[in-house]
Image (cartoon, rainbow, N blue to C red):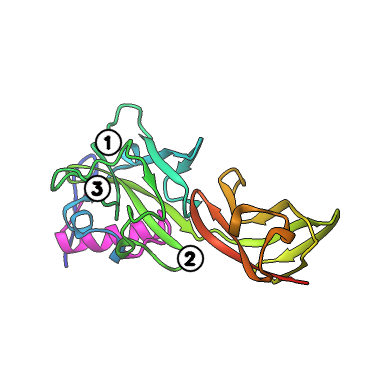
């Protein structure tokens, strides 16, 4: 590995051999851009790209999650929940004069032409198999790198972390009385009880996509026949993520 330094009249010129550039790029990604597992970045970027100068480095990306646009600064992580839909709408360099050739969501399965890496504007629904977990960092959920690059130049990276939706508790009205049940806690009812869902507490940004499924689709336990064991399934964007057991007795 060589690092050559040459002094001229006006400036100091520093050149690295390819091995040093690769190591430096990985260190830069792990330091300036936050933790990025080297195994989650294709060798295409670490071996055939050099880091952009400051003015050509990534400033931010705009990512729309469901119906909300979010600005993600270079090196930062956007956290979403399985079932969320997202699309990278824009990537901007620190210099207004610069241009980014491609935005690559590493791990995205697509029908693009072989060798194509342009994912700008591609709508991705997490939890549906569109993202290949092989390219994810699994330290906390599944974290995917989104790379901004041009031929031979790596502008920067943001990360998108996909967490599993989680039910903390559900509040029910049972015969007009408010009762709170934690996730997986069994709900015990009698055949004459009537229940109504008041609210749920989850790790979701909002409960707009939350739906409930109860066998026979009725919330009046007296219509569950015969008495026995049932479950209330909680889904987000059509993907089940919790099941609350219900026991109905005489």
Where residue 60 sits, quadrant-wise, is: top left
| Badge 2 density bin: few <14, some 14–19, many ≥20, Cα 10 Å | few
Which of the pair 61/214 is nearer the observer?
Answer: 214
**Upstream in sequence: badge 3 or badge 1:** 1
Is 15 placed left or right of 201 in the picture?
A: left
Percent across and percent down for residue 177 are: 86, 57
Which residue is identified by label 2? 140
> How many angstroms separate mark 2 from mark 1 (CA)?
29 Å
Instruction: State the extent of the magenta-drawn residues as a range.
Output: 13-38
Which residue is identified by label 3? 110
Percent across and percent down for residue 90 are: 37, 34
> How many angstroms separate mark 2 from mark 3 (CA)?
25 Å
SS for dot 2: loop
Determine the residue located farthest toward the top in the rendered image: 97
| Badge 3 density bin: few <14, some 14–19, many ≥20, Cα 10 Å | some
Of circles 3 and 1, the one toward us is 3
């Amino acid at each position: 590995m060589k690092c050559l330094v040459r002094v001229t009249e006006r400036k100091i010129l520093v050149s690295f051999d390819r091995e040093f550039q690769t190591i430096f790029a990985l260190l830069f990604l792990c330091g300036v851009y936050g933790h990025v597992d080297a195994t989650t970045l294709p060798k295409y970027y670490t071996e055939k790209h050099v880091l952009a100068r400051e003015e050509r480095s990534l400033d931010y990306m705009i990512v729309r999650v469901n119906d909300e646009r979010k600005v993600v600064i270079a090196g930062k992580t956007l956290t979403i929940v399985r079932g969320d839909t997202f699309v990278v709408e824009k990537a901007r360099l620190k210099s207004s004069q610069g241009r980014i050739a491609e935005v690559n969501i590493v791990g995205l399965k697509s029908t693009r032409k072989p060798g194509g890496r342009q994912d700008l504007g591609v709508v991705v629904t997490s939890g549906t198999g569109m993202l290949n977990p092989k390219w994810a960092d699994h330290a906390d959920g599944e974290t995917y790198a989104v790379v901004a690059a041009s031929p031979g130049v790596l502008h920067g990276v943001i990360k998108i972390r996909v967490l599993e939706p989680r039910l903390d508790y559900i509040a029910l009205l049972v015969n007009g009385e408010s009762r709170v049940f934690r996730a997986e806690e069994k709900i015990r009812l009698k055949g004459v009880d009537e229940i109504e869902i008041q609210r749920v507490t989850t790790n979701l940004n909002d409960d707009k996509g939350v739906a409930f499924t109860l066998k026979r689709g009725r919330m009046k336990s007296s219509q569950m026949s015969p008495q026995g064991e049932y479950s209330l399934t909680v889904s987000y964007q059509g993907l089940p993520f919790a099941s609350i057991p219900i026991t109905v007795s005489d």
